[in-house]
Amino acid sequence: MSTGDPFTRLAPFIQEYIYQNGWADLRSIQKAAIPAIMDTDDHVLIMSGTASGKTEAAMLPALTLLDQSPAQSVGILYIGPLKALINDQFERIEGLLYGRSDLPIQGWHGDIAYHQKKRFLKQPRGILQITPESMEAMFMNRAGELGIIFGDLRFIIIDEIHAFIGTERGQQVLCHLQRLERAIRRPVRRIGLSATIGDVDVALRWLQSSSQFQTHARLVTESTQGRRIELRVNHIVLASEEKAFYADVAPEDIGLYSRRTASPPISPSSQQEIPEGSISTEPPDVRWELQQDIQDYYDDLFAITMRYQKTLVFANRRNKAERIAAELRHRLSQQRPGMDWYFVHHSSIAASLREFAEMRMREQAQQSSVIATSSLELGIDIGHLDVTIQVNAPHSVSSFVQRLGRSGRRGAPSRMCLYTFEYLDNKAGAHSQWEQIPWEFLQTLAIIQLYLEERWIEPPDIPTMPLSLLYQQTMSVLRARTELVPSQLAQSILTLVPFQSVTLDEYRLFLQHLISLDHIARMDEGTLIVGMKGAQLTNHYSFYAIFANEQEFRVLAGAQEVGTIQRVPEVEGIIGLAGYAWRVISVDDRKKIVHVERAKGVVEQNWKTHGELQFHKQMMLRLRRILQEEIVYPYLSPLARQRLSLIRDFARRSDWLSSCVVSLEPGRFLLFPWTGWRIYKTLFYILMHMGWCSYSSDCNYYLEISHKGNSADVLTELQALSPQIPDLVNAMISKLKDIFLWRGKYDYLAPRVLLEKAYVNDVLDVPGTMQWLATCT
C-alpha cells in the first residue's frame, strides 16, 4: 500500500472542502483507512471511538475512487440502523458534495417523500442512504430495477455494525447483501463502521459473509489506551419505588425555536470534574440508616445538569426518561421561571421534537440537557458533551462503552456519572437478605471493571435458526419473483448465510406448513406463489421490518404531534409525554389518535416494560470477584463505598461464595450459577421440570430450589444430572406451550418441531449446562 501523505491522495474537491472547513489535519483513523480502501479490494472494518471521524474515514476514499472512475448507477450504498442517523449523516455528507451534481446523495426511508425517491430513480447515481426495512421494500417492489439502480455499485457502507451483528435485523442485512450481489452478479466491497466490537474476528467473518463470493476482510483501528475516563458512581437507597409522578404544563410553543432556553455562560472552572454529589454525606453503619429521600436524588441530578453546559442523561426505560425530565423541569421552573433547556429523546417522541433536541444540543452557546434512552446511544451528532449521566445500571458493557463515548470530544476526558438504586420495601422471607442485595449496583461495578481492566466487550451471540427471518425472506423472495418451483425457492433461501444450519428436509417441512396455513399456495403445475393469508401480511408496510411493531396511539396537541403511547388513556385523564402533562380530550380508536391539550398533574406510566436481561458469563464472574476482593474503586461516592463494604462483609460472614448452593432452611436452598444467561435459563427449565425449582430472581442471579437433603446432597444430585441433560431438555421442551417458544415476529407461523429445535439451539445451552453441572461445587 502507498506510504505517501494520505491527504494528497484524496480527490481535489475533497481537499478543497477540508481547507475551506478549517480541518487542521486528517484524523488518525482516516489516514489509516485511506490506503486500506484505495489500495486493496478487501472488505474493511473501521473500528474507532465515538466522534473519531469513522464516517469520513469510509466516505473520503470511497468518494475519491468514484471521482476517479464514475459509477453508472448508485456508487455507494449506506445502510444505517436509524432513520435519524441517516438524516444526520445526510446533512454532513451533503456539505461535502456541494456543487457535485454528478454525485448526489439521497436518503431512502419511510419519512422521505415519494417524489424525492421518484426523481432520484430517474438517474440513480452517487450515494443512497437506506434502512434495512426500506431495503426489504426495494427487493420486493423494485426487483426488476435492481440492476439499473445498483448495477455499477462499488461500496456498501454499514454504519454502527455492532448494532446489527448478533441480531435478527443484522441477519436480515446479510440476506440483503447476498441478494443484491446475486441481482448484479458480482461482489461489492463492504465497509463496516463501529466504536464497540466485542469480538473482532466474528465481526470480520460477518462482514465477509457470502455463499457465492469470497472476499477477505481487514481491520482498520486505532488504540484507545490514551483515552482519559472520569467516572462517578452514586448509589441511592430508597424506601420504595414510585411509579406515578407530577409533570408541569407544556409551553405553547413546544418544539419551536422560540422556546426560552438562553442561559448565562458556564464558567470553565465549574466544569473540571464530576461533583461529589450533595446526597453523598458520611453514611451510617446500618443499611436501613442509609435511606435517602427520592427528592435528594433529583436535586443532585439537577445540580449536575446545571453545573455543565451540555449533558446527556441516559435512562433504560421511556417511563424513567419522562419522569426525570419532569422532575428537572420542575426544579428549573422554581429557580428560573419561564426557562426550559431540558428535552426528552426516545422512540415514542415525535421526530420533530427529537430533531429539535438534537439541534439545541449542537448549539454550543446554549445550555441544554437531553434525557434519552438508547435512541441517542448510536452516532447521531449532538455536538460536544461535557458529561453523560447513566440512571440505573447499563444493560451491557457494550452499552456502557457506547454511552460513555458520547462525551470526551476535542481532547476532553470522557465523563460519566452513574446512579444505581435499591429499595428497602422489596420482598420479605427466608431469602430476603439475598433479594435485598444491591444487584444493580454490583452489576454496574462489574461492567465498569471489565472495561477498565480488560477493555472487554460482549461478543455477539448469533442465532443459528432465525425462523421469523426465514419466513420473511421466503415470502419476500416469492413476492419478488412471483412464482417459483420449490427447488428454486429452496436454492434461493438456503444458500443465504443466516440459514446455513437449516436442512433441506426442515425447509421442506417449513414450506408444507406455510401451504397448510394458506401463506403459500401450490399451483396445479407444482409452482409456489404467495397465498391469500400471506398476501395480507406482505402487502402491508409493517412486513418489511423483522422486528415486531408496537401497537401505539399517536398523541396530537392541535396540529402538533407530541409522540406515541401504548396504553389507551381515559378521556379527561392526564398523560405524560415529552416530559410534560397533557389532558386527554378525545380518543379515536379506529385511527389510533389521542387528542390532548396542555395540562399539569400526576401522570402514570405510558409504556409497558418487557424483555429480559441477557448477561454474559464474564459479567457474572466479575460480579462475584467484586464481592470477594478488597479493592475500593476510586470512582465510588462515600455512600457507594459504604454499601459495597456492607455487602462484602455479609458475603464473608455468611460464607455465601464458598459454594454455589446456599441453605436457607431445611429443604430450601438457593442456587447461584454465576454463569451466562443461556446456561441459567437451561438450569431453570430443567429444575422446574423436575419439580425442584420454585423461584427465579428477576435478573438471573439465583434460583430457589427444594430438596430433602442437605447442601452436599444437592450438589451430588446436580452433578449426577449432567449426562441426563439432553433427555431432560427434550422432555421439558415438549411440554412448553407454543407461546413460550415464540421469540421473533413471525415465529408463530413456524412448525412446532422447528420452534423446539431453534429454542434449544439459540436460547438454551445444553453442552454448557452439562459442563457446568459436572463441575459445580
Image: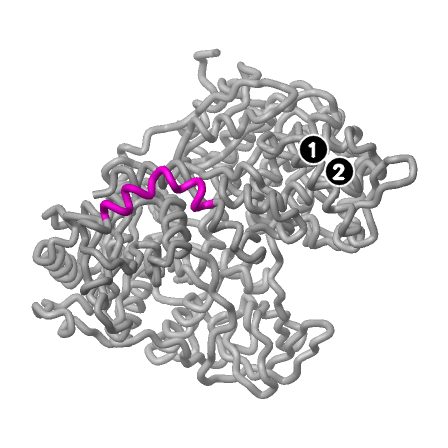
Q: Nearer the viewer, mark 1 or mark 2?
A: 1
Residue at the extreme bottom of the image, as rendered: 572
Position in image of residue 609 (x %, y %) = 47, 65
**Front in this rendered view, residue 491 or 234:** 491
Position in image of residue 430 (x %, y %) = 21, 69
**Front in this rendered view, residue 720 or 5:** 720
Q: Secondary structure at mark 1?
A: helix
Label 1, label 2: how many angstroms apart (C-alpha)? 8 Å
- The quadrant holding residue 646 is bottom left
**Residue type, mark 1 in image:** Ile
Q: Count neighbours of disc 1 (C-alpha within 10 A) and say few if under 14, some if 14 to 19, many if 20 or more.
A: many
Residue that mark 2 sits on: 477
Q: Can you see residue 131?
A: no
How many numbered tags mark residues here? 2
Position in image of residue 709 (x %, y %) = 21, 56
Q: Is residue 717 magenta?
A: yes
Residue that mark 1 sits on: 493
Q: Name the quadrant of the C terminus.
A: top left
Position in image of residue 313 (x %, y %) = 38, 60
**Front in this rendered view, residue 618 or 494:** 494
Question: Is 660 displayed left or right of 508 in the figure?
Answer: left
Q: Which range of residues does the magenta coloring cover?
A: 715-729
Whichever of callouts 1 and 2 sits on the residue coming sooner in the sequence is 2
Q: Is residue 634 magenta?
A: no
Residue at image x 38%, y 41%? 724
Residue at image x 47%, y 24%? 33
Question: Is 133 displayed left or right of 438 in the figure?
Answer: right
**Residue type, mark 2 in image:** Val
| Residues at discs 1 and 2 in contact (Cβ within 8 Å) | yes
Vertical arrangement, residue 387 with respect to residue 250, above or below = above
Residue at image x 61%, y 43%? 467
